[in-house]
Image: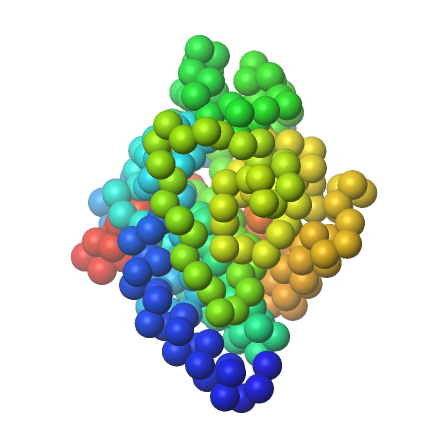
Amino acid sequence: MTGLAFRRALAVLAAGAATLLTVTAAAPAAGAAPVPAVSGPTAPPEFVALRTVAPTIIQEMRYPTRHTFLGGPVDGYREPVCIVTRSTALALRAAQSRLLRQGYSLKVYDCYRPQRAVDHFVRWAKDLQDQRMKAEFYPRVDKSRLFEEGYIAEKSGHSRGSTVDLTLVGLPALPTRPYVPGERLAPCYGPKKERFPDNSVDMGTGFDCFDTLSHTDDPRVTGGQRANRLLLRSALAEVGFTNLPEEWWHFTHRPETFPDRYFDFPVAWRSVTGR
Protein backbone atom coordinates (compact mmCIF):
# COMPACT_ATOMS: atom_id res chain seq x y z
CA MET A 1 0.00 0.00 0.00
CA THR A 2 1.44 3.39 -0.99
CA GLY A 3 1.80 6.22 1.51
CA LEU A 4 -1.09 8.11 -0.10
CA ALA A 5 -3.32 5.03 -0.14
CA PHE A 6 -2.43 4.32 3.48
CA ARG A 7 -3.38 7.84 4.55
CA ARG A 8 -6.65 7.62 2.63
CA ALA A 9 -7.48 4.26 4.21
CA LEU A 10 -6.71 5.65 7.65
CA ALA A 11 -8.99 8.61 7.01
CA VAL A 12 -11.81 6.36 5.78
CA LEU A 13 -11.54 4.17 8.85
CA ALA A 14 -11.54 7.11 11.23
CA ALA A 15 -14.51 8.73 9.48
CA GLY A 16 -16.50 5.50 9.42
CA ALA A 17 -15.77 4.46 12.98
CA ALA A 18 -18.73 6.29 14.50
CA THR A 19 -21.12 4.76 11.96
CA LEU A 20 -19.79 1.26 12.44
CA LEU A 21 -20.08 1.67 16.18
CA THR A 22 -23.86 1.90 15.83
CA VAL A 23 -24.06 -1.19 13.66
CA THR A 24 -23.50 -3.52 14.92
CA ALA A 25 -13.06 -19.20 27.01
CA ALA A 26 -11.22 -19.93 29.03
CA ALA A 27 -12.71 -21.67 32.09
CA PRO A 28 -10.98 -22.19 35.46
CA ALA A 29 -8.79 -25.26 35.73
CA ALA A 30 -10.63 -28.50 36.40
CA GLY A 31 -11.28 -28.98 40.09
CA ALA A 32 -10.53 -25.36 40.97
CA ALA A 33 -12.91 -23.51 43.27
CA PRO A 34 -15.29 -21.17 41.41
CA VAL A 35 -14.07 -17.58 41.31
CA PRO A 36 -16.89 -15.11 42.01
CA ALA A 37 -17.30 -12.21 39.62
CA VAL A 38 -16.40 -8.75 40.86
CA SER A 39 -19.59 -6.69 40.67
CA GLY A 40 -19.99 -2.94 40.43
CA PRO A 41 -21.46 -0.29 38.14
CA THR A 42 -18.12 0.88 36.78
CA ALA A 43 -14.89 -0.69 35.59
CA PRO A 44 -11.56 -0.54 37.43
CA PRO A 45 -9.21 2.17 36.07
CA GLU A 46 -7.19 -0.46 34.18
CA PHE A 47 -10.09 -0.78 31.69
CA VAL A 48 -10.56 1.54 28.70
CA ALA A 49 -12.84 1.88 25.70
CA LEU A 50 -10.84 0.61 22.73
CA ARG A 51 -12.13 3.53 20.64
CA THR A 52 -10.17 5.98 22.81
CA VAL A 53 -6.87 4.15 22.24
CA ALA A 54 -7.19 2.69 18.74
CA PRO A 55 -9.94 4.60 16.89
CA THR A 56 -9.28 3.05 13.47
CA ILE A 57 -10.08 -0.50 14.59
CA ILE A 58 -13.51 -1.38 13.22
CA GLN A 59 -16.12 -2.36 15.80
CA GLU A 60 -19.04 -4.61 14.91
CA MET A 61 -20.14 -5.58 18.39
CA ARG A 62 -22.56 -8.45 17.95
CA TYR A 63 -23.94 -9.14 21.41
CA PRO A 64 -26.00 -5.94 21.84
CA THR A 65 -27.85 -6.95 18.62
CA ARG A 66 -30.33 -9.64 17.60
CA HIS A 67 -27.78 -11.36 15.36
CA THR A 68 -26.42 -13.72 18.00
CA PHE A 69 -26.58 -17.45 18.56
CA LEU A 70 -29.22 -16.70 21.22
CA GLY A 71 -31.40 -14.89 18.71
CA GLY A 72 -31.39 -11.62 20.65
CA PRO A 73 -29.27 -9.19 22.68
CA VAL A 74 -27.15 -10.62 25.48
CA ASP A 75 -27.56 -9.56 29.11
CA GLY A 76 -25.13 -6.85 30.18
CA TYR A 77 -24.52 -5.38 26.72
CA ARG A 78 -26.12 -1.94 26.96
CA GLU A 79 -24.14 -0.27 24.18
CA PRO A 80 -21.98 -1.47 21.24
CA VAL A 81 -18.66 -0.47 22.79
CA CYS A 82 -15.49 -2.55 23.00
CA ILE A 83 -13.98 -2.40 26.50
CA VAL A 84 -10.62 -4.02 27.30
CA THR A 85 -7.71 -3.58 29.67
CA ARG A 86 -5.33 -0.79 28.68
CA SER A 87 -2.47 -3.18 27.93
CA THR A 88 -4.75 -5.11 25.56
CA ALA A 89 -5.85 -1.91 23.84
CA LEU A 90 -2.25 -0.78 23.33
CA ALA A 91 -1.30 -4.16 21.87
CA LEU A 92 -4.26 -4.05 19.48
CA ARG A 93 -3.21 -0.55 18.40
CA ALA A 94 0.28 -1.82 17.60
CA ALA A 95 -1.12 -4.72 15.55
CA GLN A 96 -3.50 -2.39 13.75
CA SER A 97 -0.67 -0.05 12.77
CA ARG A 98 1.20 -2.89 11.09
CA LEU A 99 -1.88 -4.33 9.39
CA LEU A 100 -2.96 -0.99 7.95
CA ARG A 101 0.31 -0.85 6.04
CA GLN A 102 -0.58 -4.23 4.52
CA GLY A 103 -4.04 -3.08 3.45
CA TYR A 104 -6.05 -4.58 6.32
CA SER A 105 -7.87 -3.47 9.44
CA LEU A 106 -8.76 -5.37 12.55
CA LYS A 107 -12.47 -5.71 13.36
CA VAL A 108 -13.69 -6.70 16.82
CA TYR A 109 -16.90 -8.66 17.41
CA ASP A 110 -16.62 -8.93 21.19
CA CYS A 111 -14.25 -7.72 23.90
CA TYR A 112 -14.82 -7.60 27.68
CA ARG A 113 -17.87 -9.75 28.52
CA PRO A 114 -19.66 -9.34 31.87
CA GLN A 115 -20.36 -12.42 33.96
CA ARG A 116 -24.10 -11.79 33.61
CA ALA A 117 -23.67 -12.35 29.85
CA VAL A 118 -21.90 -15.65 30.46
CA ASP A 119 -24.75 -16.64 32.79
CA HIS A 120 -27.18 -15.78 29.98
CA PHE A 121 -25.28 -18.12 27.66
CA VAL A 122 -25.55 -20.90 30.23
CA ARG A 123 -29.31 -20.42 30.72
CA TRP A 124 -29.82 -20.44 26.97
CA ALA A 125 -27.76 -23.62 26.50
CA LYS A 126 -29.86 -25.43 29.10
CA ASP A 127 -33.09 -24.49 27.31
CA LEU A 128 -33.11 -27.24 24.70
CA GLN A 129 -36.40 -26.00 23.25
CA ASP A 130 -34.87 -22.74 22.02
CA GLN A 131 -33.31 -23.60 18.67
CA ARG A 132 -34.10 -20.37 16.81
CA MET A 133 -30.58 -19.79 15.50
CA LYS A 134 -29.40 -23.39 15.13
CA ALA A 135 -29.45 -23.31 11.32
CA GLU A 136 -26.74 -20.63 11.31
CA PHE A 137 -24.59 -21.02 14.41
CA TYR A 138 -24.61 -24.74 15.33
CA PRO A 139 -26.24 -26.67 12.46
CA ARG A 140 -24.10 -29.80 12.95
CA VAL A 141 -24.04 -29.86 16.76
CA ASP A 142 -26.85 -31.10 19.00
CA LYS A 143 -27.64 -28.36 21.49
CA SER A 144 -27.56 -30.85 24.35
CA ARG A 145 -23.81 -31.27 23.72
CA LEU A 146 -22.76 -27.61 23.80
CA PHE A 147 -21.33 -27.89 27.33
CA GLU A 148 -19.69 -31.28 26.74
CA GLU A 149 -18.00 -30.11 23.55
CA GLY A 150 -16.75 -26.91 25.14
CA TYR A 151 -18.78 -24.33 23.23
CA ILE A 152 -20.45 -22.99 26.38
CA ALA A 153 -18.87 -22.71 29.86
CA GLU A 154 -19.76 -21.09 33.18
CA LYS A 155 -16.67 -18.84 33.11
CA SER A 156 -15.08 -16.97 30.22
CA GLY A 157 -11.68 -15.36 29.81
CA HIS A 158 -13.53 -12.44 28.23
CA SER A 159 -14.73 -11.45 31.72
CA ARG A 160 -11.13 -10.75 32.73
CA GLY A 161 -10.75 -8.03 30.11
CA SER A 162 -7.78 -9.24 28.06
CA THR A 163 -9.60 -11.47 25.57
CA VAL A 164 -11.11 -10.34 22.28
CA ASP A 165 -12.96 -11.90 19.34
CA LEU A 166 -11.83 -10.36 16.08
CA THR A 167 -11.10 -10.73 12.38
CA LEU A 168 -9.50 -8.94 9.42
CA VAL A 169 -11.15 -6.61 6.92
CA GLY A 170 -9.58 -5.71 3.59
CA LEU A 171 -9.38 -2.00 2.81
CA PRO A 172 -11.26 0.01 1.80
CA ALA A 173 -13.95 -1.37 4.11
CA LEU A 174 -17.68 -1.26 3.57
CA PRO A 175 -20.06 -1.85 6.51
CA THR A 176 -21.73 -5.20 7.00
CA ARG A 177 -25.45 -4.97 6.23
CA PRO A 178 -27.79 -5.17 9.23
CA TYR A 179 -29.28 -8.51 10.20
CA VAL A 180 -33.03 -8.74 9.60
CA PRO A 181 -34.76 -10.80 12.33
CA GLY A 182 -36.59 -13.71 10.76
CA GLU A 183 -34.49 -13.81 7.60
CA ARG A 184 -33.46 -17.18 6.22
CA LEU A 185 -30.47 -18.54 8.10
CA ALA A 186 -27.47 -20.01 6.31
CA PRO A 187 -24.93 -22.42 7.88
CA CYS A 188 -21.91 -20.62 9.32
CA TYR A 189 -19.57 -23.20 7.81
CA GLY A 190 -20.79 -22.77 4.22
CA PRO A 191 -19.03 -20.91 1.40
CA LYS A 192 -18.58 -17.22 2.13
CA LYS A 193 -21.04 -16.13 -0.56
CA GLU A 194 -23.72 -18.30 1.07
CA ARG A 195 -23.12 -17.30 4.71
CA PHE A 196 -24.51 -14.19 6.37
CA PRO A 197 -22.65 -11.34 4.64
CA ASP A 198 -19.66 -9.95 6.49
CA ASN A 199 -17.20 -7.33 5.28
CA SER A 200 -14.29 -9.36 6.64
CA VAL A 201 -11.90 -11.51 4.62
CA ASP A 202 -12.88 -15.17 4.23
CA MET A 203 -11.84 -17.11 7.33
CA GLY A 204 -13.62 -20.32 6.35
CA THR A 205 -16.53 -19.89 8.79
CA GLY A 206 -18.54 -17.07 10.25
CA PHE A 207 -17.99 -15.66 13.73
CA ASP A 208 -19.34 -17.77 16.64
CA CYS A 209 -19.61 -20.85 14.44
CA PHE A 210 -19.97 -23.83 16.80
CA ASP A 211 -18.26 -26.29 14.48
CA THR A 212 -14.91 -28.05 14.26
CA LEU A 213 -14.25 -26.13 11.03
CA SER A 214 -13.70 -23.11 13.30
CA HIS A 215 -10.57 -24.74 14.75
CA THR A 216 -7.75 -22.48 13.62
CA ASP A 217 -5.61 -25.25 12.13
CA ASP A 218 -8.38 -27.51 10.84
CA PRO A 219 -6.81 -29.27 7.84
CA ARG A 220 -9.96 -28.78 5.74
CA VAL A 221 -9.27 -25.03 5.71
CA THR A 222 -6.81 -24.37 2.91
CA GLY A 223 -5.76 -21.75 0.39
CA GLY A 224 -6.78 -18.15 0.98
CA GLN A 225 -8.89 -19.01 4.02
CA ARG A 226 -5.92 -20.60 5.76
CA ALA A 227 -3.66 -17.74 4.76
CA ASN A 228 -6.11 -15.25 6.27
CA ARG A 229 -6.24 -17.15 9.55
CA LEU A 230 -2.47 -17.35 9.74
CA LEU A 231 -2.09 -13.65 8.94
CA LEU A 232 -4.44 -12.73 11.79
CA ARG A 233 -2.72 -15.09 14.21
CA SER A 234 0.82 -14.01 13.32
CA ALA A 235 -0.03 -10.29 13.47
CA LEU A 236 -1.49 -10.67 16.94
CA ALA A 237 1.20 -13.06 18.17
CA GLU A 238 3.81 -10.38 17.43
CA VAL A 239 2.20 -8.13 20.07
CA GLY A 240 1.59 -10.75 22.77
CA PHE A 241 -1.70 -12.46 21.89
CA THR A 242 -2.34 -16.20 22.10
CA ASN A 243 -5.01 -17.84 19.97
CA LEU A 244 -7.55 -20.34 21.32
CA PRO A 245 -7.04 -23.29 18.92
CA GLU A 246 -10.76 -24.11 18.80
CA GLU A 247 -11.79 -20.61 17.63
CA TRP A 248 -9.87 -18.75 14.91
CA TRP A 249 -11.35 -15.43 16.17
CA HIS A 250 -10.48 -15.77 19.90
CA PHE A 251 -7.28 -14.19 21.27
CA THR A 252 -5.96 -13.38 24.75
CA HIS A 253 -3.27 -10.82 25.49
CA ARG A 254 -0.65 -11.97 27.98
CA PRO A 255 0.40 -11.36 30.62
CA GLU A 256 -3.21 -10.67 31.61
CA THR A 257 -3.84 -7.65 33.79
CA PHE A 258 -6.39 -9.65 35.80
CA PRO A 259 -5.47 -13.34 35.39
CA ASP A 260 -7.67 -14.52 38.27
CA ARG A 261 -10.52 -11.99 38.43
CA TYR A 262 -13.85 -11.99 36.62
CA PHE A 263 -15.91 -8.80 36.31
CA ASP A 264 -19.59 -8.02 35.93
CA PHE A 265 -19.89 -4.29 35.19
CA PRO A 266 -22.09 -3.62 32.12
CA VAL A 267 -20.78 -3.01 28.63
CA ALA A 268 -21.49 0.72 28.33
CA TRP A 269 -19.54 3.93 27.85
CA ARG A 270 -20.44 5.01 31.37
CA SER A 271 -18.64 1.99 32.79
CA VAL A 272 -15.30 3.48 31.73
CA THR A 273 -16.13 7.20 31.72
CA GLY A 274 -18.22 7.52 34.87
CA ARG A 275 -15.57 6.48 37.35
46 sits to left or right of 275: right
Q: In which quarter of the image is residue 18?
A: bottom left
Residue 41, image x, y percentages: 22, 45
Residue 25, image x, y percentages: 55, 39
* Image quarter in which the N terminus is found: bottom right
Residue 38, image x, y percentages: 34, 40
Q: In which quarter of the image is residue 231?
A: bottom right
| Residue situated furthest left in the rendering | 274
| Residue situated furthest bottom in the rendering | 3
| Residue situated furthest top in the rendering | 129
Residue 203, image x, y percentages: 63, 50
In this rendering, is residue 229 above or below 151? below
The residue shown at (40%, 44%) is: 62
| Colour scheme employed for the rendering of this structure | rainbow
Number of disc labels: 0
Residue toward you, 273 or 175: 175
The residue shown at (35%, 65%) is: 17
In this rendering, is residue 173 above or below 217? below
Residue toward you, 250 or 173: 173
* Image quarter in which the C terminus is found: bottom left
The residue shown at (53%, 88%) is: 3
Residue toward you, 47 or 218: 218
Q: Is residue 92 visible?
A: no
Q: Is residue 155 visible?
A: yes
